[in-house]
Every structure is written in structure tokens, then in C-alpha cells.
Amino acid sequence: MDFDKLSKRYARQSILLTAGLALLGLLVANVRQTDGIIVPLIVSSLFVLVMELSSAFLWRWVAVKHSDMLPSFFTGVSGFRFLLALAVMFVWYLVTNRQSTITFFVVFLIFYFVSLIHHSVFFSRVSNRL
């Protein structure tokens, strides 16, 4: 199995999915004429891109060097993503007001769950092939 090719496909899909969500968010912001969604879109997009791209390249390294550790890797990535998401939301909560926090949480959780679904579907298909 070509792990480089799969890793690049996952990274490409992640970038396209994140860009699509961000464009959809910008469309919603434009239609509703709200500027309060722009910063949450940027933060959420950056969070998802960093997590997805780092997990893609780390997965490739683990699959090539230590394929017996893949189940532990998936558990670790999921746990780390969850804890980092909680940390980002907590920092946002401390820094901003109540209405901004609710808007951020909604936008951030949409990005988080879409990336979680993408991660689960992609790697379940790959694991089934292995």
C-alpha cells in the first residue's frame, strides 16, 4: 500500500473540506451581514488544518515505521485533538464576551465534527484495506 499517496490524498481532502466550510461560513456571514463570524471561521479553519495536516503526515510516518502502533496512534490523535479543542474553546471563553463565545463554539464545533467525521471515514476505509 502506498502510504505517501494516501497521506497526500488525506491532506488534500482536508484542505478542500476546510476551504469549503470556510467559504460556506463566509457566504452565511455575507447573507446575514454579520462580521462576528469571521474570526471564529479563521480560528476554526487554522485549528482543523493544523490538526489534519499534522495527523496526515504523522500517520504516514507511523504506518511506514511502526505499523503495529496504528491503533494506539488513532486513539492518541483523537484524544489529543479533543483536548486541544477544549483548550482552544476555554481560551476563547476567557478572552471574549458571552455572545461571541456562543458564536465561536457553534462555528468551531461544526468544523471539529466535520473534521472528526472525515478522519474516521477516511482511516476506517484505509484500515479495512490493510
Image (cartoon, rainbow, N blue to C red):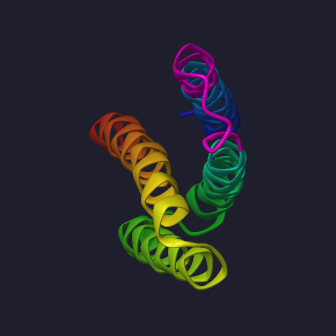
Q: Quadrant of residue 71?
A: bottom left
Q: Quadrant of the C terminus?
A: top left
> What residue appears at the point 39 percent right and 49 percent down from the top-left corner?
116
Is residue 65 positioned above or below 30 on the image? below
- 128 left or right of 18 in image: left
> What is the count of numbered marks?
0
Q: Quadrant of residue 122?
A: top left
Q: Residue at x 33, y 46 (%)?
A: 120
Camera-side residue: 31 or 128? Answer: 31
Q: Which residues are magenta?
A: 25-38
Identify which residue, 127 or 31, lies in the foreground: 31
* Residue 63 is one of the magenta-drawn residues: no
Q: Identify the residue at horizontal 50%, vertical 69% (top origin).
A: 81
x and y percentages locating residue 55 in the rendered image: 61, 57
Q: Nearer the viewer, residue 52 or 129?
A: 52
Q: Identify the residue at image location x=61%, y=41%.
A: 37
List x then y, in percent, for residue 45: 66, 44
| Magenta highlight on residue 32 | yes
Where residue 97 sits: x, y (%)?
56, 72
- In the visual, does 121 lie left or right of 115? left
51, above or below 120, in the image = below
Rendered location of residue 2, percent (x, y)? 61, 33
Give the dominant element type of the magenta stretch: helix, strand or loop. helix
